[in-house]
């Protein structure tokens, strides 16, 4: 990426100071939200409201124009009417601001006059060297920059970067994902892509140390060839998961009126994704299921998996894996005998999947079985239950892992969970977990998360997560040839 573009994007995602142009003290207006959200979510730097008719907004000193601000500004957030945006950008350029997020709508998505204004704004930005997010967008989130323009509550910090062409839809998906425990490094509502496009963000994120996985919701491209050229390079370094909308004729028309994007041929898009190794999903929430596994686990060397769980869970999980091209090799006699010794007497003989037969077991026993699997050269990954937690039977039990003394049952459970969580890194093979019930503040999920092991709520989700890892393993091997 060009150094100037990289610097501008760094300033956008890590601004030391921001100016909100079109700031308002009226709740519900975008000029109010763009101040209220960064204030409430802990943005550490100065926030300068720009409004010629106000002395103060939300307790912050207001300025009549951006040029009147005494300090340096890294990011301008523009919420003024469409017709004013080109002039506002000229003021930002004069102030030396490197980046702007243009929330304002009414551009190319609305017709010819809007298209002309968008082209004028883009031309002003290009001539003055300022880079634009949007227009017609809902802002950005940066965990490292402690900046949230789009979320009223900052989501959990993580290593998934999410680029969305839709503002409302993208924010909604990201918020649900955050509520389910998925962590974000960055989120961008890219809008009409008058200047910065999908390819620019992907190229920047390739070298972002806070991002391990790039997730995309796209409807169309301004420059499809550049996107695929960039993605072909980036996917060698980091996995890219894509949800492509606008696949039907009716949806393509909707995309044009939404963000002024040409959706293009779904057949051609699918073919190119397969060629260069992008992982496609066809349901929106599958984006984060797959991205979460890719964010923290080693990729497998093949597609051979072992499953540990209840009888029905094993059957359903096997079907889900096989449907995705994942194999479940039978266990050799020696391994089967070793695992049988760890199972209750009434459990069926260990094959693959292995059935605990509903018996009470400890986290340490489960870790021992998982380790038996991972030692095998014909097993590349494991799907299993979340290790049994004392909180499953005592929901009100509070556990402090760092306490010098704890009950024996808790000590054994924590030790088993820690051994379990260390296995992926120890063996260089992925483990994903299933839990049907939701336990609040569960110690086991906390421990597993520290080891990069994701927890899902259905066998099908676990299979998709493992498929994502298998897919990216193939991509890495093909790129090393």
Image (cartoon, rainbow, N blue to C red):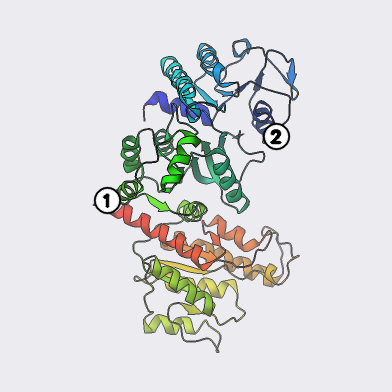
Q: Which residue is mark 2?
A: 40
Estimate how packed mark 1 is, as few (under 14), some (14 to 19) or many (20 or more) residues with alpha carbons within 10 Å. Answer: few
Q: In the rendered structure, find residue 39 and report the number of the disc placed on it.
A: none
Query: Is residue 331 in sight in this rendering?
Result: yes
* Spatial separation of the CA atoms under disc 1 and disc 2: 46 Å
Q: Describe residue 136's horizontal placement relative to residue 226 as left or right.
A: right
Residue furthest to the left in view is: 481
Frontmost residue, 188 versus 430: 188
Q: Secondary structure at mark 1?
A: helix
Q: Describe residue 424's horizontal placement relative to residue 28 as left or right.
A: left
Q: Nearer the viewer, mark 1 or mark 2?
A: 2
Q: Residue at x 34, y 71 (%)?
A: 378
Q: Quadrant of residue 323?
A: bottom left
Q: Whole-percent x and y of residue 82? A: 55, 21
Q: Whole-percent x and y of residue 402? A: 67, 57
Q: Height in image: 306 above or below 179?
A: below
Q: Height in image: 434 above or below 469?
A: below
Q: Residue at x 58, y 40 (%)?
A: 168
Estimate how packed mark 2 is, as few (under 14), some (14 to 19) or many (20 or more) residues with alpha carbons within 10 Å. Answer: few
Query: Is residue 430 in sight in this rendering?
Result: no
Q: Secondary structure at mark 2?
A: helix
Q: Which residue is mark 1?
A: 480
Frontmost residue, 270 versus 256: 256
Q: Whole-percent x and y of residue 72? A: 57, 16
Do the CB atoms of the residues marked 1 and 2 lie less than 8 Å apart? no
Q: Height in image: 249 above or below 462?
A: above
Q: Quadrant of residue 222?
A: top left
**Viewport quadrant of the N terminus:** top left
Q: Height in image: 138 above or below 348?
A: above
Frontmost residue, 340 versus 84: 84
Q: Whole-percent x and y of residue 38? A: 65, 32
User: Counting residues from the N terminus, which is met first, the one under dot 1 or under dot 2?
Assistant: 2
């Amino acid at each position: 990426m060009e150094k100037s573009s990289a610097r501008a994007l760094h300033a956008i995602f890590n601004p030391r100071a921001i100016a909100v142009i079109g700031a308002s003290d009226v709740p519900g207006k975008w000029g109010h939200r763009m101040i209220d959200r960064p204030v409430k979510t802990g943005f550490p730097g100065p926030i300068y409201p720009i409004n010629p008719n106000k002395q103060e907004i939300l307790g912050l000193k207001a300025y009549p124009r951006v040029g009147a601000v005494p300090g340096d500004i890294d990011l301008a957030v523009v919420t003024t009417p469409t017709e004013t945006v080109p002039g506002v950008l000229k003021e930002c350029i004069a102030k030396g601001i490197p980046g702007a997020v243009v929330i304002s709508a009414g551009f190319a998505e609305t017709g010819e006059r809007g298209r002309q204004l968008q082209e004028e704004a883009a031309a002003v930005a290009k001539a003055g060297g300022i880079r634009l997010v949007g227009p017609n967008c809902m802002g950005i989130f940066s965990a490292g920059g402690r900046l949230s323009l789009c979320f009223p509550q900052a989501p959990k910090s993580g290593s998934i970067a999410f680029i969305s062409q839709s503002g409302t839809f993208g924010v909604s998906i990201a918020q649900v994902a955050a509520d389910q425990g998925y962590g974000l490094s960055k989120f961008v509502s890219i809008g009409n892509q008058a200047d910065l496009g999908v390819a620019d963000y992907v190229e920047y994120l390739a070298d972002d140390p806070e991002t391990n996985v790039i997730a995309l919701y796209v409807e169309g491209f301004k420059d499809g060839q550049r996107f695929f050229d960039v993605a072909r390079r980036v996917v060698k370094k980091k996995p890219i998961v894509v949800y492509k909308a606008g696949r039907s004729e009716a949806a393509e028309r909707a995309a044009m009126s939404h963000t002024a994007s040409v959706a293009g041929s779904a057949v051609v898009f699918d073919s190119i994704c397969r060629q260069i190794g992008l992982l496609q999903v066809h349901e929106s929430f599958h984006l984060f299921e797959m991205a979460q596994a890719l964010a923290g686990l080693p990729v497998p060397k093949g597609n051979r998996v072992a499953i540990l769980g209840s009888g029905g869970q094993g059957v359903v999980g096997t079907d889900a894996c096989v449907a995705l091209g994942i194999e479940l090799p039978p266990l050799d006699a020696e391994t089967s005998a070793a695992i049988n010794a760890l199972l209750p007497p009434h459990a069926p003989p260990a094959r693959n999947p292995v059935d605990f037969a509903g018996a009470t077991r400890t986290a340490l026993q489960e870790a021992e079985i998982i380790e038996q699997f991972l030692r095998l050269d014909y097993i590349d990954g494991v799907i299993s239950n979340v290790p049994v937690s004392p909180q499953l039977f005592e929901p009100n039990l509070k556990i402090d892992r760092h306490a010098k003394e704890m009950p024996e049952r808790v000590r054994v459970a924590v030790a088993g969970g820690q051994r379990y969580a260390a296995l992926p890194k120890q063996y260089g093979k992925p483990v994903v977990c299933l839990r049907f019930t939701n336990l609040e503040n569960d110690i086991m999920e906390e421990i597993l998360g520290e080891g990069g092991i994701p927890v899902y709520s259905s066998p099908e989700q676990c299979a998709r997560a493992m498929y994502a890892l298998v897919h990216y393993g193939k991509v890495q091997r093909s790129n090393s040839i």
